């Protein structure tokens, strides 16, 4: 498929300054997309944007991935009701390193260039910036931004000059990349449209050249209407220290039938035939959850690599698929231990169940055991017994304790 067809089919089409997105099917374009290092990890919302970038790269366009060391010092005020807390240079540097590593992981094997706007802002003279750039940015365009109106309104919390200037700084990023690298297109999420248009306008005013913006829609969970990637525990992060590999995998595995095919189009590189086959399986055999399993596999491989993906699949198979506990590797056991209660060996099954919270009392534990609700290493037990070796105790379908 041509790029315009691929973007349309995968659901990456939203607003754009192009009259026709088939313009993307012609000569190679140098483009950029930016992320501020406000945290030491990106989320799966960012991952969606990276997958869109990957489609552009696969179709011959040249990517510049901007990690905003300068804008990160200010913080994007769009969508925020109050001032962001200021981060130190050390925090920003640490976050930039982490985000760069995630770009390298997700885009492994693809050609792209990392750029940092701190490199061109660090030594910039303030008066020169006002004279050469600020002079050409009308206040009306900045004051008309929705978030500025909200923050300056009677119910707003106000806005600092620093945050007010954020869109001007981002606009200059586009101008700088246009002049230095010939970048003529900015990719962004739907919520960044206003900031991105500011760069198009600046390039037109200063260099009398045409530049463009292409945005993807903001994703929502089709079943709940909630912003995609949000859970009760907060955002789903790409860093395993913030969202464990197990929880990350389970997030995708628990995708709803209504949205799973859309997620496969966005978060995997599977081709049309493969995804259409999985769509048929959702319709004909939804209980098999073949699409969810494939989505969880592909999305976890992309971010965490083959070894960790195979490990989390073994763990999931033991917990929910009846696989043999003793097929788990040492690192799989460590993964399991970080997700479920752990008790020491040498205790009775009843004592372990009570200690781990699988039963409220010895008598309840005894009733559960005699009623066939408890298994050790996938084998049902009918009476109390000592557990002297590493084992997995399971109550019902979803309650576990690791004995080690």
Image (cartoon, helix red, strand yellow):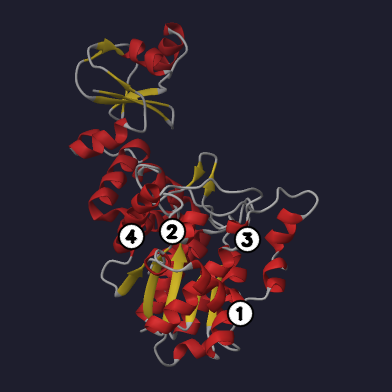
The span from disc 2 to disc 3 (Cα, nearest Å) is: 45 Å
Give the labeled residue for mark 3: 164
* Nearest to the observer: residue 123 or residue 398: 123
Give the labeled residue for mark 4: 100
Query: Relative to residue 12, is residue 206 depicted above or below?
Result: below
* Nearest to the observer: residue 30 or residue 307: 30
- Residue 112: percent from the left, percent from the top? 32, 73
* Mark toward the start of the polypeptide (2 vs 3): 3
Nearer to us: label 2 or label 1: 1
The span from disc 4 to disc 1 (Cα, nearest Å) is: 33 Å
- Residue 222: percent from the left, percent from the top? 60, 57
* Mark toward the start of the polypeptide (2 vs 4): 4
* Nearest to the observer: residue 335 or residue 154: 154
Give the labeled residue for mark 1: 136
- Residue 101: percent from the left, percent from the top? 30, 58
At x 35% / y 16%, what residue is drawn? 382
* Mark toward the start of the polypeptide (1 vs 3): 1
Number of residues whose C-alpha sits closer than 10 Å to that of mark 3, classed few (under 14), some (14–19) or many (20 or more)? many
Give the labeled residue for mark 2: 291
């Amino acid at each position: 498929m041509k790029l315009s067809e691929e973007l349309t089919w995968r659901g990456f089409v939203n607003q754009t300054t192009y009259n026709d997105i088939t313009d993307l099917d012609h000569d190679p374009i140098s483009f950029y997309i930016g992320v501020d290092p406000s945290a030491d990890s990106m989320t799966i919302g960012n991952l969606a944007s990276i997958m869109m970038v990957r489609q552009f790269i696969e179709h011959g366009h040249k990517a510049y991935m901007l990690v905003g060391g300068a804008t990160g010092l200010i913080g994007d005020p769009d969508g925020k009701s109050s001032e962001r807390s200021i981060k130190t240079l050390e925090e920003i540097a640490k976050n930039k390193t982490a985000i760069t590593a995630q770009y390298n992981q997700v885009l492994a094997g693809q050609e792209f260039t990392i750029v940092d706007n701190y490199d061109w802002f660090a030594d910039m003279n303030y008066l020169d910036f006002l004279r050469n750039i600020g002079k050409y940015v009308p206040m009306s365009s900045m004051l008309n931004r929705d978030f500025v109106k909200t923050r300056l309104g009677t119910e707003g919390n106000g806005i600092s000059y620093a945050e007010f200037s954020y869109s001007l700084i981002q606009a200059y990023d586009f101008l700088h990349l246009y002049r230095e690298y010939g970048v003529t297109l900015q990719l962004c999420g739907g919520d960044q449209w206003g900031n991105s248009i500011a760069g198009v306008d600046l390039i037109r005013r200063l260099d009398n050249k045409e530049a463009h913006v292409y945005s993807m829609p903001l994703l929502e969970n089709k079943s709940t209407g909630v912003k995609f990637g949000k859970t009760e525990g907060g955002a789903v992060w790409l860093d395993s220290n913030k969202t464990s590999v197990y929880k990350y995998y389970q997030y995708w595995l628990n995708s709803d039938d209504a949205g799973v095919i859309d997620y496969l189009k966005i978060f995997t590189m599977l081709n049309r035939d493969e995804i259409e086959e999985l769509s048929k399986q959702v319709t004909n055999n939804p209980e098999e959850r073949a699409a969810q399993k494939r989505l969880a596999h592909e999305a976890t491989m992309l971010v965490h690599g083959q070894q960790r993906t195979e490990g989390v699949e073994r763990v999931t198979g033991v917990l929910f698929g009846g696989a043999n506990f003793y097929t788990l590797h040492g690192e799989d056991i460590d993964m399991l231990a970080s997700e479920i209660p752990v008790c020491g060996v040498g205790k009775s099954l009843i004592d372990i169940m009570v200690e781990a919270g699988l039963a409220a009392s010895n008598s309840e534990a005894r009733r559960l055991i005699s009623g066939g609700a408890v298994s050790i290493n996938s084998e049902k037990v009918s009476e109390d017994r000592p557990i002297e070796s590493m084992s997995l105790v399971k109550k019902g379908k979803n309650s576990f304790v690791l004995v080690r």
